[in-house]
Every structure is written in structure tokens, then in C-alpha cells.
Image (spheres, grey):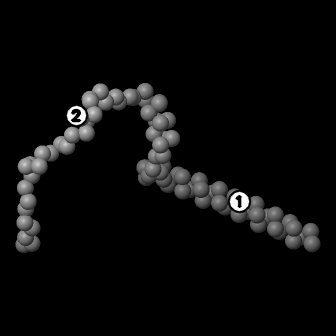
Amino acid sequence: MILLKFLFVLIIVGAVIFLLGIGLVLNFVRKLFGGSRPQTARGRQQSAGKTKEHVEDRRDPQTANRKIFSKDEGEYVDFTEE
């Protein structure tokens, strides 16, 4: 009975060590290849706070919400495959 308890604890500890090792390897590979998780709103606030960069739009709402292109700009092109 004691041997079974010891084996059970040994398996649990081994699984925890294995999962921690996998996590460390994945973190290392992610940093090595420059991959990153998408930033949440909290992450963006923290990074903006560190750089002290602030953008303020002082335009009136009419100017800020206007369309960039007028209706007569652009053209329709009929696509033909060569």
C-alpha cells in the first residue's frame, strides 16, 4: 500500500515537472522565433504607459468622421483572365 502511494506521488511530481519543462521549451521557441501573443487592452495600456506616448485628435467630429474618398473617385475595372 505504501509503495502504491509512493508511485502515485512520483507520477504526479513527474507529470508536473514534465509540463513545466514543456512550457519552458515552448516559451523559449516563441521568443527565439519572435512569436508573440496578441496584446489585450491591458497589454496595450501598459506598453503605452511605458513609452509615455499619447495621441490626441483635436479635429471636430465632422472633419474626423468624413469619408476619405468621394463618390466620383475610383473606377470599375472589368476583370479578364489571361
> Between tags 2 and 1, which lies in front?
2
Q: Could you say which quadrant of the image residue 2 lies in?
A: bottom right
Residue identifier under label 1: 16
Within 10 Å of disc 1 (Cα), the crowding (few <14, some 14-19, many 20+) is few
Please state the horizontal and vertical placement of residue 56, each as a whole percent of the image.
Answer: 34, 28
> In this orientation, does residue 36 appear?
no
Kindly identify the residue that appears in the image at 87 percent across and 67 percent down: 5
**Above or below, 67 relative to 79:** above
Kindly identify the residue that appears in the image at 39 percent across and 28 percent down: 53
Q: Answer yes or no: do the residues labelled 2 and 1 have beta carbons within 8 Å? A: no
Q: Could you say which quadrant of the image residue 64 lies in?
A: top left
Q: Which mark is residue 63?
A: 2
Kindly identify the residue that appears in the image at 9 percent across and 49 percent down: 73
Considering the numbered disc 1 on the image, is that residue within a helix, a strand or a loop? Answer: helix
Left/right placement of residue 34 relative to residue 71 reads right
Q: CA distance from mark 2 to mark 1?
A: 58 Å
Please state the horizontal and vertical placement of residue 50, each as a whole percent of the image.
Answer: 47, 30
Depth order, front residue of 71/43: 71
- Residue type at mark 2: give it: Thr
Left/right placement of residue 52 relative to residue 3 reads left
Left/right placement of residue 17 relative to residue 42 reads right
